Amino acid sequence: MCSSPLEIVRYNIRYEKEDRLLKELDLSVFSESESKRPHSVEFSIMANHPDNITASVEGVTSFLKFPLRHLTITFTYLRNASVFDDKGVVRGCQQLEEAILTHKMPRLTISLPRAKQNRLAFWSRMIQQRFPHLHGGGKLEVHCSSEDLGHDWQVMTIAASPDGRYFATGARDGTIIIWSTIAYPQKSLLEITSSFRGISALAFSDTGDFLAAIHTDKHDVLTVWRVVDGSQLISTEDIKQTNIQSCVWRRDGLDCIYLSALAVSSCPDEVSESPLVQLLFPSVYDTGNLITLPLKPALAVSSFSRKVTEPLPVQLLFTSVYDTGKIASLHIPYSAYVESNGFENLHRNEMFTVLSSDGRLATVVPVERCSELGCRVWHTADPTAMYRLTIPFDTTPSSATFVGDTLVIGFKDGTIQWWDLSSFPLATTGPPGGTLTVRDNGQGVLALSASPAGSFLAAWGSEEYIWSREEYIWSPTSVTLFRKHCADFLPHVSLQGHTSRVNAACFSPCERYIATSSYDSTVRLWSVMDGSLIWRFTDHSDEVGHVVFSGDGSTLASADYEGQVCVYPVSLFVGSDVSRAPLTD
């Protein structure tokens, strides 16, 4: 290796358990003579865990035996900013800063190749806190070299404001980013960082002024944020052991906006005393009142299985942004045998809870081992009026959605069934109003997506595990569109083209287009009328998990599992000759 004073020495550090690579780095390039030592050293640290980051930073500190003109540290795989809050990392950064100041090195560069461009200010603040003296002396540089925009962690949900102004994306690390719907240049307007982690759902109010988020941390938390400044208005952090399933906004007159959230209380494994249900009455202008009510369940537990006969507590939360909200607690009677092996409580993976788009109707659809519970549906204005829908015992629900006032449930046998609830609760509810086979190959209906006006329904399949061959068989990559005609659903067109599983589908507000995202890292824009492909977007480098149209239909946003968010102007890719799909035969 050349020892020229212009030489830049690069080291790649892959830290693993009991790895001694840092102590074995070649120091022969250094010399007591300044003319025979390199002026710059670059370290690429390929580690993610705080302990590994700590060891790597301490190793770099011990490596600094002589002054350098420039030291560059590249955290190759680092995407979790919380590692800089770890005590060991904080201590290691302090030692490194002291060594740099001692040797009077003129500059330190921290490079983050995986950090998105729009997060430069966030990462800069985080790293500047770890090196305050270098930052104060103008000796610290922070680079986010990724050309992408978005989150540093996987995007878990995406939403569009009904007024057409904003997109919102929520990531696994709990960050929320508000985006402008003006596609060029793509711009993030606000970043919200809370103490809660993963986000399962986001919902804008009708005017886009407020944003609700459901966080899936140690326990679920519902928060409400003011979009203009990112200030938090409401949090249900004090409500423990509650799985918050979904939420929807509704307006009551000109001055009151309500947020309806559906939550299911967890069932304890062992009951030694009556469990407590906490009811929170939050208010924007008050701290809120917390009321705790005891329930008296009846459990009989055996060594192999247990008979659960207690009511299933369901909370329907009405939170007013301008006034005190209220919670209505519902109890769904059920009886089910559950295997004790691997059972961890009734949670979101074992039921679907769906609110209609106007917040008027709510339903709980149990799945898997609780399928015999049947389906319960009720009117949110009168939670006491609850009805049961008859679901066949020979198949299991796998998805559910409202298409206007029609509840549609997808099943693992590849069929869908629907119930017309337009006159609910006046009409008697019971057997389905219709049944239709979506897939005849034995693969289930993974998900359903309804068009805004309720004219169309999209359905796509899921993977199936073959026990005899110990492998997954992936479903067809097509999406089937159905047209609603009177009280029935009729097959319309099939969207063919994705090369891997479809993750999401979204109709445009005008119902002329539908966008789909897939594991094949593409987003595709289709004509609803004839199912023809209008455009294929290839900007993502990882599986695309979410896609949504803006409230006015002018732009399309998508997000992938690496955190990248893309915004596209629809007008650049569609022509005036793309007509609306017919609504009648």
Image: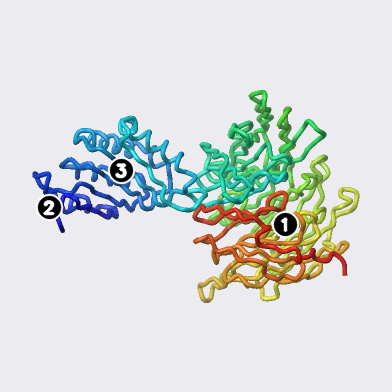
Q: Is tag 3's residue or tag 2's residue first in the polypeptide sequence? A: 2
| Image quarter of the N terminus | bottom left
Q: Identify residue for label 2.
A: 28
Residue 508's disc is: 1
Badge 2 marks a residue whose secondary structure is loop
Horizontal arrangement in the rendering, residue 174 relative to residue 441 (left or right) = left
Q: Position of residue 287 (x, y in %)?
A: 64, 24
Q: Residue at x 65, y 67 (%)?
A: 461
Q: Is residue 156 left or right of residue 297?
A: left
Q: Position of residue 574 (x, y in %)?
A: 69, 63
Q: Is residue 369 left or right of residue 43?
A: right
Tell me the quadrant of the picture where the C terminus can be found: bottom right
* Res. 123 image quadrant: top left
Spatial CA distance of label 2 from label 1 is 64 Å
Seen from the viewer's position, the closer of residues 564 and 433 is 564
Residue under label 3: 54
Using a 10 Å C-alpha cutoff, classify the residue at mark 1 as few (fewer than 14 neighbours), some (14 to 19) or many (20 or more). Answer: many
- The foreground one among 325 and 391 is 325
Three-letter amino acid code at the position of disc 3: Thr
Residue 60 appears in view: yes
Q: What's the coloring here? A: rainbow
Judge depth for marks 1 and 3 and give the one in front: 1
Dots 3 and 2: beta carbons under 8 Å?
no
Closer to us: mark 3 or mark 2?
2
Judged from the image, the secondary structure of the residue bearing numbered disc 1 is: loop
Q: Residue at (83%, 66%) from the top-left corner?
A: 582
